[in-house]
Amino acid sequence: MMPDRQPWGARLGVRILLAAILVLGVGALTAWVVALAIGPAIFHEHMLMVETSNPDPEVVKHAEEAFDASWQLSLLLALIAAGVASVLVSAFLARRIAGTLNKVRSAAIQVAQGVYSARVPEGAMGAEFTEMISAFNRMASELDEIEHTRKRLLSDLAHEMRTPVATVDGYLEAMLDGVAAADSEILTMLREQTDRLKRLAEDVSLVSSAEEHRLSMESQAISVAELVSVAQGQARSFYAARDVDLQIEEEAEEAMVVGDRDRLSQVLTNLLDNALRHTQPGDQVTLRTGSDSATVLLSVEDTGHGVAPEHVPHLFERFYRVDTARDRAHGGSGIGLTIVRSIVEAHGGTVRAESRGPGHGALFTVELPRHD
Ligand SMILES: Nc1ncnc2c1ncn2[C@@H]1O[C@H](COP(=O)(O)OP(=O)(O)OP(=O)(O)O)[C@@H](O)[C@H]1O
Ligand SMILES: [Mg+2]
């Protein structure tokens, strides 16, 4: 144990005791000097004021000696009692403080060794200790969460890469063995897989940058109408090809937001892309805008597949897909909504998802601070 190796004078208990003895010493010395300087003089004066006209000097001398002996004895006894009390109190305090500090120290050592589940039990040592312990525990639980996310991210990433890499590998091997020819159909397929890997790398890097608050973003005033028209322009042909009706309902054309034009357009593009993927021909998707004095609302609502309530809270998590097989078959890696949330939060906004359940469509609402 580290405290045992500490030099004697560096121990907390010894320091508290020395401090107590110092206070005691100063108090006792002051009391002694003051008593010595003024006590006998006052007593002597009082003795001379005794009613008998001529006090016997012998009686006065005895009385004064008795006075001296009694105040010195009282002071000495008080000093001994205070000395014993301060040793006991110092030892008690030191034990309790050192006990608490030791608990924090061993938890910190555990955290340093990567055991992020280590926590310090809360004691009754007073507000400052409680605050220190709860700050420590908060730090440990944040680290725990970061570590958990890091592990999951790595395994999800490996999982996402495996399929396209295996596909590319399979085709290349077939071509090398002469089983397949490098015709345009196969080359297109290879290209699709490498595109998917490229997009995955870009998406992951974007989300990581955003989470570390180092997303490079322009900061300019953009009108809501402009964002809508860019997104609509990009989506129009895909919607037409799938026969899904894209409605625009604008109630905030003149409202402005501040931020990165391309990234904010990407938010709407991702939402419109999801809505298109989860609707059938004949369904309808509505891109709506609205505003009040402080916020701008952008929402994308569809009449498509919808989402079961148990999945709704997880939609914005990295690599989360409701129907893993089907959503992946659509080419999705489940990172689109994470990007949406990262971008929106980097702009000081929020995003939420709602659905009345499978078959009843979904609604995604983005709220951004309004710029005047
Ligand atoms: N409009 C929607 N209707 C129903 N489900 C949706 C809708 N939008 C998203 N989802 C569900 O949320 C999941 C996560 O969406 P997200 O955009 O993050 O990933 P993705 O679309 O699968 O892949 P990516 O966007 O990375 O290409 C989707 O896989 C889908 O299951
Ligand atoms: Mg998506």
Image: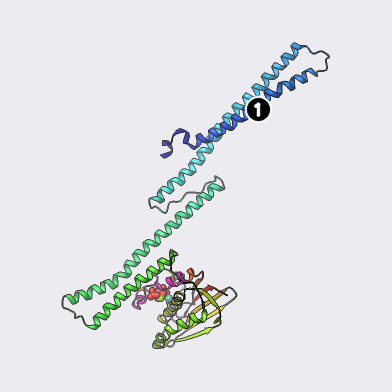
**Residue at 56% from the left image edge and 81% from the top image edge:** 254
Assess whether residue 241 is covered by the magenta stretch.
Answer: no
Vertically, is 232 above or below 319? Answer: below
Principal secondary structure, stretch drawn in magenta? helix
Instruction: Give the quadrant of ligand 2.
Output: bottom left
User: What is the quadrant of the N terminus in the image?
Assistant: top left
Which residue is nearer to you in this view: 174 or 34?
Answer: 34
Specify whether residue 263 is in view. Answer: yes
> Within 10 Å of the Cα at label 1, are there few (<14), some (14-19), or many (20+) other Cα atoms?
few
Give the x, y percent position of residue 354. Answer: 49, 75
In front of the other: 30 or 362: 30
Q: Position of residue 206 (x, y in %)?
A: 40, 69
Side (left or right) of 157 relative to 36: left
Percent position (x, y) of residue 100?
Answer: 49, 44
Q: Quarter holding the C terminus?
A: bottom right
Which residue is situated farthest in the left direction here? 178
Three-letter amino acid code at disc 1? Ala
Residue displayed at 74% across by 11% down: 58
Q: Name the residue under label 1.
A: 31
What's the image's color scheme? rainbow
Q: Give the image quarter of residue 173.
A: bottom left
Residue 322 visible from this viewpoint = no
State the extent of the magenta-drawn residues as a range: 326-343
In this rendering, the answer to whether 60 lies above or below 334 is above
Relative image position of residue 129 (x, y in whole percent): 53, 47
Which of the 4 image quadrants contains residue 164? Answer: bottom left
Quick check: is 341 in the magenta stretch? Answer: yes
